[in-house]
Amino acid sequence: MRKSLKELASIRSGIFLKPQENGDLVYMQAKYFDSEGSLSSTIFPDIKRRNVSDKHLLKAGEILFSAKGWKNFTSVYKAEYPAAVASTSFLVISLETELVLPDYIAMILNSPQSQESFKKMSKGTSIPSITKKLLEEFEIPVLPLEVQEKLVKLSKLKNEETWILDELDRLRKLKLDLSILKIVQNYD
């Protein structure tokens, strides 16, 4: 069975704020994430709480969809993250059903097939973007929860394997560079 995202969740836009020093909340921006949707940098509170309505605070399990740019990655906001709000780069997906897991939705939206669909659907020439309406119409295959859990675990293992292989490749190159350097230094 397939359901449109609007049948499973509500979607809202991130908000525009100007980051400042010594904030109380993190202003989640696309630059904090890698292309797979993992936090790739240290984040610091950079906006004042008094400037933000409660309805904009991110909750654990909400899904951040990077709607602007060439890579529309998705990331699940985790309970261990600091208090935050999403920037206008994101559409925030709040599940309204227990038929699907947040990590499953993120996995589907991050899949190569979905990414290809987003490229075809995107609007704009200089900075392509996915509108809220387009995302609401995007269809998600609804599988049994235990299957979703297994697929999410498999996807995480695949990502870990990719990271390990990339790290191994980096270390091999470093070893080769050091070997070359050692040989060159021995001729001095």
Image (cartoon, grey):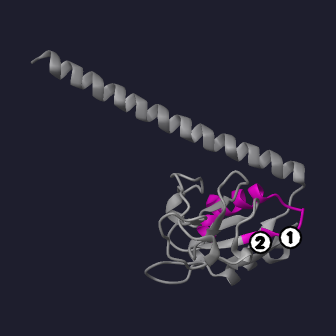
Q: Is residue 66 magenta?
A: no
> Of the numbered discs in the image, which one, if any, rests on residue 13?
none
Residue pictured at 58% horizontal, 55% vertical: 36
What element does badge 2 sit on?
A: strand
Q: Is residue 127 left or right of residue 91?
A: left
* Front one among 87 and 170: 87
The answer to whether residue 135 of the structure is visible from this angle is no
Q: Of marks 1 and 2, which one's residue comes earlier in the chain?
A: 1
Q: Is residue 151 left or right of residue 40?
A: right
What element does badge 1 sit on?
A: loop
The answer to whether residue 63 of the structure is visible from this angle is yes
Graded by Cα atoms within 10 Å as few (under 14), some (14 to 19) or many (20 or more), the crowding at tag 2 reads: some
Residue 155: x and y, percent?
69, 47
Residue 145: x and y, percent?
88, 53
Residue 17: x and y, percent?
54, 77
Tell me the kind of residue under disc 2: Glu
Residue range of the region highlighted in magenta in the rendering: 93-117
> Badge 2 is on which residue?
139
> Of the numbered discs in the image, which one, if any, rests on residue 96?
1
